[in-house]
Amino acid sequence: MGQSTDSTIKSTSRAYIVYDKATGEIALVHHAITFSNGLQPAEKPEAAALRLSGAPNAANYLVLDADAAEVNKLTPIQVDITNHKVIPKIKK
């Protein structure tokens, strides 16, 4: 959770996960912090995540908006493509 010197400004941290919609393999986890001051970012976090992922064919990828705590774990993760949820990575 972010901090501010102004106690009236609250921050929210989210993770935007770019993943292959056929396999659930994660290409990028983009963290974005927004503040309650009402200012909107220049680019939507989902669009920024997709752009930053460098995905060669963006049509094959989706972006999942997730709680940052879901991806801040020590175990590898992937996306369950049926339920669109973060799950532990399945070993092959």
Image (cartoon, rainbow, N blue to C red):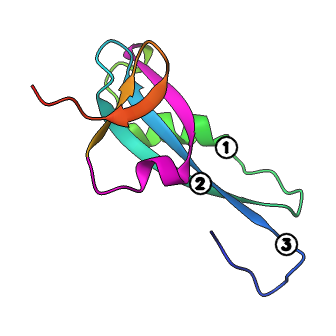
- The residue where tag 2 is placed is 32
Range drawn in magenta: 60-75
* Residue 32 point in image, percent of width and height: 59, 54
Left-right relation of 3 to 29: right
**Residue kind at label 1, given as amino acid type:** Glu
Say whether residue 8 is magenta.
no
Q: Residues within 10 Å of mark 3 (few under 14, many from 20)?
A: few
- The residue where tag 1 is placed is 43
Q: Residues within 10 Å of mark 2 (few under 14, many from 20)?
A: some
* Residue 75 point in image, percent of width and height: 27, 50
Q: Earlier in the sequence, mark 3 or mark 1?
A: 3
Residue 6: name its quadrant: bottom right
- What kind of element bears circle 3? loop
Left-right relation of 73 to 16: left
Q: Earlier in the sequence, mark 1 or mark 2?
A: 2
Residue 12: name its quadrant: bottom right
Eyeballing the image, is 35 above or below 43?
Answer: below
Q: Residue at x 69, y 78 (%)?
A: 3
Kindly give the residue lying farthest to the left in the view shown.
92
- The residue where tag 3 is placed is 9
